[in-house]
Amino acid sequence: MSSRVTSDRARRPRSPRGGGSVLRDELVLAATALLDRTGDPDRVTIRGVAAEVGVAPTAIYLHFADRDELMVTVVEERFAEFRRTIDEADPGGDPLERLLARGEAYVEFALAHPGHYRALFGGFGLSLDRPELTARCQAAGAPAFQALIDAVQRCLDAGVMRGSDPYPIAVAMWSTVHGYADLFRTCRPMMPAVRTVLTALVAAFRPVE
């Protein structure tokens, strides 16, 4: 989803009560729009989502056990979009260029959708007493991380990076882009371009001449 969801929601007429699977989709869209508009997962509430769609709060419980289950469903959809966004930025060809482009797309998504990004990485207060929901979040995020591991492995296979295990390098890359996205919001004047930062990191893994 893009910020277009918010404008679409503003034009959408209120839904009738009890619209079955259509209502369920409307509730997920409404929660997604609230995340985009507020940038804060804590402001996505049962009452707020219900008001966005035009139903009573009790209607939400016909489709979701509670807010946690609704938010996990949103996270599953947003992780899929997150992965698509990064994949679409991948130019193919040179493996190092592909890795850098994917890192840039990661940060661009995080900055364009701060509420979604916070929710993706555990920022919506999921109860520790709901391991089944935690497992769903982890399963939703796994393909994106595996794609990063695969991107690093291509660099290792091509000999443009050194090492035998792509996993710790992938964690280093992830830590860098994640930290960059957080720091950029509060320390923007100090931050060089993300590609510059990633290039400096990758240099540590380049083959020794």
Image (cartoon, helix red, strand yellow):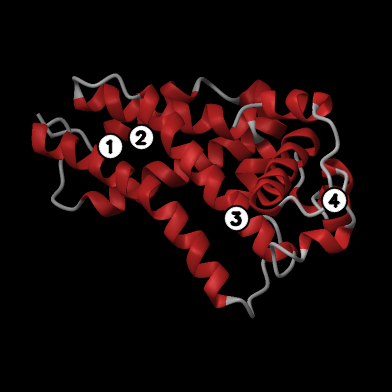
Mark toward the start of the polypeptide (4 vs 2): 4
Disc 4: which residue? 50
Q: Are marks 2 and 1 in contact (CB under 8 Å)?
A: yes
Helix or strand or loop: what does disc 4 sit on?
Answer: helix
Percent position (x, y) of residue 117? 61, 42
Disc 3, disc 4: CB below 8 Å? no
For the point 33% across and 24% down, the residue is 90
Disc on the earlier residue, 3 or 1: 3
x 90%, y 56%: residue: 56
Q: CA distance from mark 3 to mark 4?
A: 16 Å
For residue 55, side relative to residue 99 (left or right)? right
Q: Are marks 4 and 2 in contact (CB under 8 Å)?
A: no
Q: Which residue is mark 1?
A: 204
Dot 4 alpha-carbon crowd within 10 angstroms: few under 14, some 14 to 19, many 20 or more: some
Residue that label 3 marks: 73
Furthest-bottom residue in this view: 129
Residue mark closest to the camera, 3 vs 1: 3
Say how many tags the image has.
4
Residue 129 vs residue 167, the one in the foreground: 129
Pointer 2 residue: 201
Q: Nearer the viewer, residue 14 or 93?
A: 14
Say which element carries label 1. Answer: loop
Which residue corresponds to the image point at 69% horizontal and 32% vertical from the top-left? 185
